[in-house]
Amino acid sequence: MPEAAPPRATAPPAPTSTPGDSHRTGVRPGLVLATVSVCQLMVTLDASIVNIALPAMGESLGFADGSLPWVVNAYALAFGGLLLLGGRIADLVGHRRALLSGLVLFGLASVLGGFAQTPAQLVAARAGQGVAAAVLAPIGLTLIMVTFAEGAARARALGIWSMVTAGGSALGVLLGGVLTDLLDWRWVFFVNAPIVLVGLLLAVRSVPVGRPSLTGRPDVPGAVLGTGAMTVLVYGLMETDRHPWGSARTLGTLGAAVLLGLLFLLWEARFARAPIVRLGVLRERTAWLSSLLVTLLGAGMLAGFYFSSLFLQNVLGYGPLAAGAAFLPFCAGTAAGSMIASRLTARFGGRATLTGALLLSALGMLWFGGLALDSDYLTGFAGPSIVASVGVGICMVANTAMGTSGVDPREAGLVSGLLNAGRQCGGSIGLAVLSTLAVAATRRAATDGDTARAALAAGYDHAFVITAGLLGVAALVAVLFVPPRRTAERSARASGSGSASKSKSKSGTTEASARQ
């Protein structure tokens, strides 16, 4: 008879430190927050910093038609697909070691991207950045949860972390334009070197050397299946501009993605000894709901940045510097929305705040859908930028707060991974679908006799309108499933009490095992 497999763990491991005990371990919370903010800024910055530089990259390296989005997708796919494994790696080797390794890998991939001579080399470097980001991103929220005590201090830290997350993408577009115009597109990669250096110095000083909280091997098969499913799915969607939706190639590719996804779920539920996704956590409403909302928001955000930057350059004739500067209102609006999100949530509750923020974002994208060849900057671009960005900033902070409320600190890394994976994978899938639809709309307009610029404008406007629809669907989900304010408060109190009891029980069990 074959040997029985050892039982799988049904609960997360005990943490190496007690949340809020930084005053006893000598950890300086301010430096920890600065460290995770620098890492998160770089991770989100590089999701959008290449957008303004895409035309220059395509011309310099000779990208084939329709292949340029892979500069964006290679990063998003590696990042989103490996996020959950990245969190497990941090548990296996320790947060400090994982953080330092991720920063070094990010810096190396960035330098290689700056020296790329072919499209394949550039896409490979972007994938390397995504792998490093998948290691760095889950650590940030986990370190906040174990460093800051429950209450006002943790709320302020989460607000700053969420603001950096929301504002990094907008800042990336601005910085990308400045670097591309004043220096060269390669500097959108080289600029990461000093950021990595600052991150390494802060990490050495702020993150203590701790023992890993897990033993054993990471769930490599789960990571391969999950990443493979996402990669095949996005590839199949991107190819629909050349192969119709009903073609054997498209149906076969999408079918393979579904099969890989089902195998991933089966492996995680039945066979993985230390699954990268403990599926039981998705029974919590806040976990699956926040992940769904951030997936839809991620699709809208990434597509919005991508198409608006192309519209400015390919239709309105902006140079890289002018296009980057055009995103200043978006940066300001995102920061403003992030700063007022906590107060709005405290006053009106999560459901009203999230619904209003998503509708505001949808309105901004719908306004973008009216861009034309003769649009002026103030009413055609700055206006919708402010409306959409304020909504995005509010939604990012409110959704993160909802997703982490009542979560056992030992599962903070898993929940952080789910939220980051949702945003990245949603953005990648959304960009693939919307790029295909935009190309189709452009071809229809060209067939009807429109000029090349007018046809491009029609395609981009079509993508903006669909993006507004996605955000509208997210608002509907928030109305239907986010609990009312009083219900959410009662659930949070009950969850907090339950988590505290479980933590004490598990802590006692761990100490007893250690004595034995």
Image (cartoon, rainbow, N blue to C red):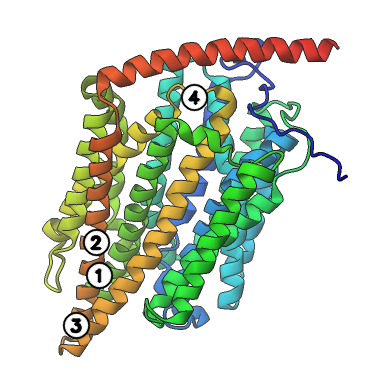
Mark 2 vs mark 3: which is more N-terminal? 3
Q: Is residue 147 above or below residue 294?
A: above
Q: Amino acid at mark 3?
A: Ala
- Label 3 crowd bin: few (<14), some (14–19), many (20+), radius 10 Å: some
Q: Amino acid at mark 4?
A: Val
Which residue is label 3 attached to?
A: 445
Image quarter in which the C terminus is found: top right
Which residue is label 1 attached to?
A: 460
Is residue 110 visible in this depiction of the protein?
no
- Helix, strand or loop at disc 1? helix
Image quarter in which the N terminus is found: top right
Q: Looking at the picture, tell me which residue is in the foreground, 187 or 386.
A: 386
Mark 4 vs mark 3: which is more N-terminal? 4
**Label 4 to label 1, Cα distance in Å?**
40 Å
State the mark number for residue 466: 2
- Helix, strand or loop at disc 3? helix
Q: Looking at the picture, tell me which residue is in the foreground, 82 or 196.
A: 82
Left or right of 162? Residue 31 is right
**Label 4 to label 3, Cα distance in Å?**
50 Å
Residue 250: image location, x then y, percent = 45, 76
Which residue is label 4 attached to?
A: 407
Q: Determine whether label 1 and label 3 are within 8 Å by CB.
A: no
Q: Amino acid at mark 2?
A: Ile
Q: Amino acid at mark 1?
A: Tyr
Q: Determine whether label 1 and label 2 are within 8 Å by CB.
A: no
User: Which residue is most to the front?
Assistant: 1
Residue 465: image location, x then y, percent = 20, 61
Residue 325: image location, x then y, percent = 30, 57
